[in-house]
Image (tube, helix red, strand yellow):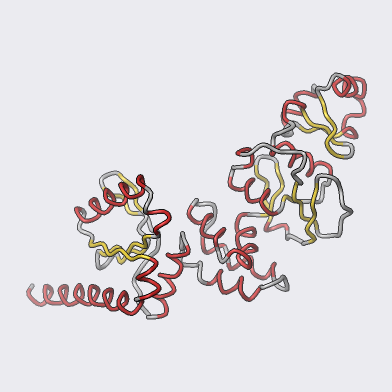
């Protein structure tokens, strides 16, 4: 197979030791500048020097037992590695079970990631989305969990299974708390707090971000009480004040109302300053629905 073909199949990366029989051709590509050495024994297609994907692939090829880590791993799993160009000042972040010597262009984290929590994304070795999200929860209050849930990159039921693999790592109790609070599928910090309020007050019968199809359009209400035909939405100002989101919210609410759903909307201030009032309103609406249903049943 031609070296250029192999390079194309490997994200633009070639290792010198893998192509000893093609040494003449390999050296010619280096001499003409078509191949550029970026790490010991590892070369990349000169046209892809600023490709973050290619530079990550080069680091993984140089250190076979490693996985991408940190922001590089998150970007790979999210499909956003090439959204920003790679600079020679940027290190590639790798994780390995054993201590590694410092290397130019690479930063190391010592951590054993079990095989069942690893994945391969476009030829790049990474921890799984569930592992990355649960691991980060000790530092980011569940922000990566919410991002991956929102993007459909993991299911909330996958998260608890990661916790044993992270036992003994820093702030593990905090991580466990956040993972337990994520099993109901929150897509934002506000939704997480709203769900915690519902659980604390033993309000049941709801699903979070469960798909509704209305008039051919797919909606994912923050909280849905299907039996009561009630939707509860959390409106964070940073997102919902944007003009396009403002318009979408109104269209969405109209569709829900026309389809027979009632909609209650709450803000950060209401959630933080008036949680009791919020709970009382929900209970009133839900109790009214039960009473109405019971009266209808007796009338029939």
In front: 144, or 298?
A: 144
> Percent from the top left, x then y, of residue 266?
33, 66
Q: Which quarter of the figure has residue 104?
A: top right
**Image quadrant occupied by the C terminus:** bottom left
Which residue is more in the foreground, 80 or 270? 270
Closest to the observer: 239 or 175?
239
Residue at position x 92%, y 29% in the image: 20
Query: Farthest residue in the left direction?
Result: 299
User: 222 or 272: which is nearer to us?
Assistant: 272
Residue 66 left/right relative to 77: right
Horizontal and vertical percent for residue 197? 40, 75
Q: Is residue 57 above or below residue 181?
A: above
Image quarter hosting the N terminus? top right
Left or right, residue 63 beside residue 170: right
Q: How many marks?
A: 0
Residue, x 23% and y 62% (percent of image)? 262
31 sits to left or right of 278:
right
**In which quadrant of the rendered view does residue 122 lie?**
top right
In the displayed structure, 53 sits above or below 156; it is: above
Compared across the picture, whether 74 is left or right of 47 comes to: left
Q: Position of residue 167 (x, y in %)?
A: 70, 72
- Residue 238 coordinates in the image, percent (x, y): 43, 56
């Amino acid at each position: 197979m031609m070296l250029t073909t192999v390079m194309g199949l490997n994200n633009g990366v070639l290792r010198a030791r893998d192509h000893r029989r093609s040494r003449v051709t390999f050296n010619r590509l280096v001499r003409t500048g078509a191949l550029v050495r970026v790490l010991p024994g590892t070369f990349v297609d000169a046209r892809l020097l600023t490709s973050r994907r290619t530079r990550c692939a080069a680091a993984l090829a140089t250190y076979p037992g490693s996985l991408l880590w940190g922001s590089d791993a998150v970007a790979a799993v999210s499909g956003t590695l090439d959204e920003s160009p790679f600079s020679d000042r940027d290190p590639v972040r790798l994780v390995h079970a054993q201590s590694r010597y410092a290397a130019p262009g690479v930063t190391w984290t010592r951590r054993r990631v079990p095989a069942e929590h690893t994945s391969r994304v476009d030829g790049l070795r990474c921890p799984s989305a569930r592992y990355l999200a649960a691991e980060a929860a000790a530092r980011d209050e569940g922000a990566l969990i919410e991002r991956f849930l929102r993007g459909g990159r993991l299911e909330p039921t996958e998260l608890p299974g990661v916790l044993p693999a992270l036992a003994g790592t820093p702030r593990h109790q905090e991580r466990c708390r956040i993972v337990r609070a994520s099993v109901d599928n929150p897509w934002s910090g506000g939704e997480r707090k709203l769900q915690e309020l519902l659980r604390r007050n033993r309000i049941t019968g709801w699903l979070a971000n469960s798909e509704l199809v209305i008039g051919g359009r797919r909606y994912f209400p923050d909280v849905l009480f299907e039996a009561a035909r009630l939707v509860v939405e959390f409106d964070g100002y940073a997102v919902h004040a944007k003009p396009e989101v403002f318009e979408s919210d109104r269209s969405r609410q109209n569709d829900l109302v026309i389809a027979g759903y009632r909609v209650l909307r709450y803000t950060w201030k209401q959630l933080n300053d008036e949680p009791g009032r919020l709970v009382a309103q929900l209970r009133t609406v839900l109790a009214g629905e039960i009473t109405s249903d019971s009266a209808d049943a007796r009338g029939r």
